[in-house]
Amino acid sequence: MHQIVFLDRDTIPHQITLPRPAFAHHWQEYPITSSAQVAERLQQATIAITNKVVLNADTLRQLPQLKMIAIAATGTNNVDLDYCRGHGIVVSNIRGYATGSVPEHVIAMLFALKRNLFAYHRDIQAGVWQEKKQFCFFSHPIGDVAGSTLGVIGSGSLGQAVAKLASALGMKVVFAERKGAASCRDGYLPFEQVLQTADTITLHCPLSEETTNLIAAPELAQMKPGSLLINTGRGGLVNEEDLVEALRSGHLGGAGCDVFTQEPADESNPLLANAALPNLLLTPHVAWGADSAIQALANQLIDNLEGFVAGHPQHCV
């Protein structure tokens, strides 16, 4: 009988139905799990489920019973994949579940930043309208979405879905080739050219050694004055201190961040420390979180378990 342990069940809202596998099993779940608790809680597990709990080589060496790790998310940087491949541990992730939710979040951020909705809201709270004594006031620029250029970095399912929505809004969409690539694939433009010409950059690539600090001071300096940066990918893709400086200097028109280098972020995070900036929009890693998307994730998670036990593992990484 398989022993299944879900290390961070609270990453899936409890109003979402989480089915149980059809095969014989014992199910144990914990709301959250600290790094010090992982090895103990997985000691008898044959299948581990994790969303964000880290499973590194030091921990995995202590778990001889473990046969499968089911990541309840798309990102895999919290699991030592090399160790798992070398020791016969199957690792699966979730794919394609948020191709509606994440793009809508990107577009929502885009409109909010282009039209400076939150800046105007704060002005009203501060009494600016009453001071102006006019039927309207213009204390922040209001830009057009239609006719502007969206640069997409990361052309997987999410990047493609964002591009489809943006095109429907009348935007010109360009895809960036990988940073440092010697040549461009068909349908792509050089990375630097996209930075220099796009009115908005949106990030949809995985976090790896190659993509850490993909957007830092040199890249931000290349972006068009007044342009926007939206990151719903991974926090480490952007150097947060450099981003704040680009916003404070006025070089960037705005930024929307749903992800952070450390989550949950605390007061030491440069973005949180500067959350009062009128052109900075922050959300707590919820772009993926439409109810329909989370239910699709939960269903696919259990499908991954059942496929593994049936001898047909799917979504392996």
Image (tube, rainbow, N blue to C red):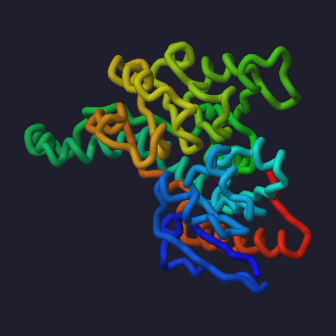
Instruction: Give the total number of marks visible in the rendering.
Output: 0
Q: Position of residue 25 (x, y in %)?
A: 72, 83
Residue 139 makes an appearance in the image: yes
Q: Is residue 36 left or right of residue 234?
A: left
Residue at position x 72%, y 57% from top?
93
Task: Relative to 252, say whether 136 is above or below.
Answer: below
Task: Single out the residue that lies furthest toward the right.
Answer: 311
Expressed as whole percent of the image width and height from the top left, the position of residue 194 reads 66, 23
Judge whether 222 appears above or below 64 on screen. above
In the image, taking residue 168 as reference, residue 139 lies left or right, namely left
For image coordinates 55% across by 44% down, the residue present is 232
In the rendered image, residue 111, in percent from the top left (x then y), is placed at: 47, 45
Residue 96 visible in the snapshot = no
Left or right: 52 as drawn, with respect to 305: left
Between 110 and 51, the one nearer to me in the picture: 51
- Residue placed most toward the observer, 255 or 110: 255
| Residue 182 picture location, percent across and down | 83, 14
Residue 91's image quarter?
A: bottom right
105 up-or-down from 199: above or below:
below
Residue occupying image coordinates x 49% and y 79%: 15
Q: Residue at x 79, y 28 (%)?
A: 188
* Closer to the camera in the image, 35 or 134: 35
Looking at the rendering, in which quadrant would you find the N terminus? bottom right
